[in-house]
Amino acid sequence: MATKPASKAKVAIPQLAWDKVRPARVVLVSGTEGFLADRAIRLLRDTLRIEDPSLELGDLEADHYAPGELITLASPSLFAEPRFIRVTGVEKCTDAFMEDVLRYLENPADDCYVVLRHAGGVRGKRMLDAIRGGLGNGIEIVCADLKKDTEKLDFAAAEFQAAGRRVTPGALRALVSAFSDDLAELASACQQLLADASEQITEVTVEKYYSGRVETTAFKVADAAIAGRHGEALILLRHALASGADPVPMLAAFASKLRTMAKLYNVRGSDAQLAQQFSLAPWQVNRARKDLQGWSDDGLGRSIELLADTDAQIKGGGRDPVYALERMVGIVAGRGAR
């Protein structure tokens, strides 16, 4: 899996893919793909625990950091157990955190592993440049988004290869098609197939488990429109209708996504908290929050009002249900603009 340095500064430390993580006194986990970053950190923690079950775990939030916290956690305990310190929110870190890390890098503690999770941006550049320049003798784990289908196919194939299981190319393509928008969901689907399917995993196996996702043409149309990709949404819509798709499920997909977005508009809380509050799955909350980017309250309201009118049009109240759907796609793609 290719890695790309996140800075133009000279890099003097190893830059590794998420699945090549290894112990080091300082581990910078960079990049925007949170799922891979979480996996890398978990893999490193588990590796260290196998080496020494007495491993002490500590957590810091760099964006709510108080001076001296890092030094306190990194100090040897009474019985000198190894320490694993996971630091989140480094891309939003306080000045105090940056200064303490720069001091710490001058002389990292023995038998202590400090993992810094930086999700992107320019905040902390001086600190990042120091780490990448070799101060602290660390390593960097680069977790960039997997944007190309080929990268996602390679990821899914590696999931099965790691488990020693055979999977057909058709099965991999079907999985990536069904879960292309969310790497965590793709990984979860692979793991479920590994746990439940006893033989070689084929396209038929994938369809058996995920037929509802493999055939989610309606949701692909809705996803493209909600993201503002008008042309793509229209092409998908016309192809689906030409293939015999029913307009009613098309509308239902829009209704499902827009109403979930409305529930979560300007609502604060973690994905888990909001999932419980609104009877949703955490991944649905996460997806709706991403979908809401670029939307206004008025635009969302107008789009939801349009659902009722479109529903009446496609159920006999209008002369041309296809035109009604295309009109709705255009307005939604414009994020409800008049």
Image (spheres, grey):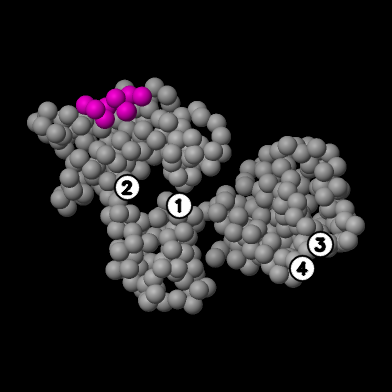
C-alpha gap between disc 2 and disc 1? 13 Å
Query: Callout 3 environment at 10 Å: few (<14), some (14 to 19), or many (20+)?
Result: many
C-alpha gap between disc 3 and disc 1? 35 Å
The disc label shown at residue 52, or none: 4
Dot 3 or dot 1, earlier in sequence: 3
Query: Callout 1 environment at 10 Å: few (<14), some (14 to 19), or many (20+)?
Result: some
Given contact means CB atoms under 8 Å apart, are the residues at marks 3 and 4 in contact? yes
Residue depicted at 45% across the width and 45% down the height: 281
> Which residue type carries mark 3?
Pro
- Which residue occupies the foreground of this view, 6 or 18? 18
Give the extent of the magenta segment. 301-309
* Residue of label 3: 82
Q: Quadrant of the C terminus?
A: top left
The disc label shown at residue 163, or none: none
Dot 3 or dot 4, earlier in sequence: 4
Query: Callout 2 environment at 10 Å: few (<14), some (14 to 19), or many (20+)?
Result: many
* Residue of label 2: 220
